Image: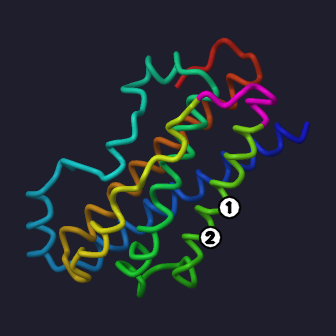
Amino acid sequence: SDNQRLFNNAVIRVQHLHQLAAKMINDFEDSLLPEERRQLSKIFPLSFCNSDYIEAPAGKDETQKSSMLKLLRISFHLIESWEFPSQSLSGTVSNSLTVGNPNQLTEKLADLKMGISVLIQACLDGQPNMDDNDSLPLPFEDFYLTMGENNLRESFRLLACFKKDMHKVETYLRVANCRRSLDSNCTL
């Protein structure tokens, strides 16, 4: 069905974004001097991502128990939260990035967001939309604007958060897709 094709497409797209995020962070680390790398290793584990304010299932069990609609909605918010910052994300690794032009990342996110919103509509299918969280204000535009361009720490945190969030979305979409096929055994 159309829906299944859309779902598969969304999963493939987010997998690609997740792989891209992993590559970006590797390239970034490879470009650092040993001293810079030592500094960074002191900062992590990652304390805080801007997307942490988006309510998401804590751990595998809660993800398993979440409805398909809820997983799609959270995925939508996570992807949306990166549309703006992805513009500066491309800048952090521009020289080593294989994404081509910097806007490509932003476009990929926008495409995926559109796909997920179609899936949400299909999932609602005529039900009233009871979720008033849908127009969450995005609190981080200012945060990213004040971010020092060559602030090593911030660039790294941005990349690490991006990777973490793409991984989350990939997990949620896989589970939602499995849930859709009425397979009760959607193991993570």
Q: On screen, 12 above or below 177?
A: below
Asked whether 54 falls inside the magenta stretch, the response is: no
Is 104 positioned to the left or the right of 20 in the image?
Answer: right
Q: On screen, 46 above or below 123?
A: below
Looking at the rendered structure, the secondary structure element under dot 1 is helix
Residue 91: image quadrant is bottom left
Asked whether the residues under the numbered discs 2 and 1 touch, taking CB atoms below 8 Å apart as contact, a structural biologist would say yes
Q: Give the dominant element type of the magenta stretch: helix, strand or loop.
A: loop
At horizontal 57% and vertical 83% (from top left) the residue drawn is 100
At horizontal 80% and vertical 30% (from top left) the residue drawn is 125
Q: What residue type is disc 1 on?
A: Asp
Q: Which residue is mark 2?
A: 107
At horizontal 71% and vertical 27% (from top left) the residue drawn is 128
At horizontal 24% and vertical 74% (from top left) the residue drawn is 147
Numbered label tally: 2
Real-space Cα separation, disc 2 to disc 1, in angstroms = 6 Å
Q: Within 10 Å of the Cα at label 1, are there few (<14), some (14-19), or many (20+) other Cα atoms?
A: some
Q: Looking at the figure, which quarter contains the N terminus?
A: top right
The magenta-colored residue range is 122-130
Mark number displayed over residue 111: 1
Q: Position of residue 55 (x, y in %)?
A: 39, 34
Is 182 positioned to the left or the right of 148 in the image?
Answer: right
Along the line of sight, the residue nearer the viewer: 75 or 36: 75
Q: What residue type is disc 2 on?
A: Glu
